Amino acid sequence: MAHTKSITAAYRLAHERYSALGVDVDRALKALAAIPISLQCWQGDDVGGFEKLGTSIGGGLAVTGNYPGKARTPDELRADLEKALSFIPGRHRVNLHAMYGEFGGKKVDRDEIEPKHFKNWIAWAKSRGLGLDFNPTCFAHPKAADGFTLSHRNKSIRNFWIEHCRRSREIGAAMGKALGTPCVTNVWIPDGYKDTPADRQGPRERLAAALDEVFKKQLPAKHLLDAVEAEALRHRRGKLHGGFA
């Protein structure tokens, strides 16, 4: 009870401060309540996923996948997400990475994933009135170990990731269709050099051609909203990565 009173007191104080600055707090909160937040699934297990590939996360990510108390199964992760969402006002969404599919204990490589591997997630989201968003998982895989995926100079590796991203879009569209709300499918691209490379044009050309292949098939906008996030170039601006130039 004392905790609730302190929160209420803090809210009233904040309300007064913002109102003094001309902010209609009640109107702002009403607008905010209509904006869904897409909660990242990997916050529940430190980017462990549920594949059986036997690989480490890698890729320069600041995670280990082994923090205490993490969700060990899809059911545990869904229970944790439900608990987290119970504290967040409004109706929201959950963002899934491809590595969070349910593969029945079998090894299913990234270029083999299908909507059926996410049927339990879709059923769970539908039963709770949640939307789902989706990401290909272009890291934590032997074919991403050197820091390149869609721009890889090896054509077979590049084609592997193209197929993975193609299938991810199909899965996103299936989610959007089943749930009646468009699935934002974000192609996160980790590729980049830590040093200034001699060839700055080649990787860019390969990446552009690969993305053309990934997005060649038109999928209904009422089911799927495409997005692209070039992480390496963003890191370069923060001087953490060299990018391609």
Image: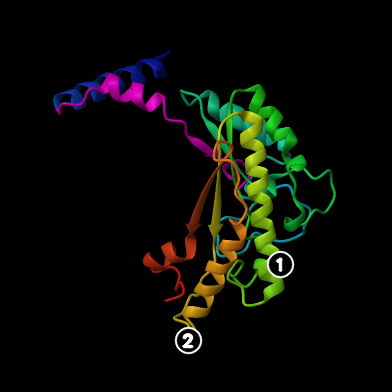
What stretch of residues is rendered in magenta? 21-46
Q: Is residue 36 left or right of residue 105?
A: left
User: Which numbered circle lies on residue 157?
Assistant: none
Camera sees residue 69: no
Q: Position of residue 186 (x, y in %)?
A: 54, 50
Say which element carries label 2.
loop
Q: Is residue 201 left or right of residue 97?
A: left
Q: Earlier in the sequence, mark 2 or mark 1?
A: 1
Nearer to us in this view, 121 or 145: 121
Residue where numbered disc 2 is placed:
198
Q: How is the image coloured?
A: rainbow
| Residue found 20% across the figure and 21% down from its top | 16
Tell me the quarter of the image containing the C terminus.
Answer: bottom left
Nearer to the camera, 185 or 5: 185
In the picture shown, does residue 36 fall above or below 168? above
Kindly indicate the quadrant of the structure image that contains residue 28.
top left
- For the residues carrying marks 2 and 1, which lies nearer the camera in this image? 2
Where is residue 98 drawn, in percent x and y? Answer: 67, 49
- Confirm whether residue 1 shows in the render: yes
Quarter of the image holding residue 41? Answer: top right
Residue at numbered disc 1: 142
**Viewer-closest of 114 and 237:** 114
Q: Secondary structure at mark 1?
A: helix
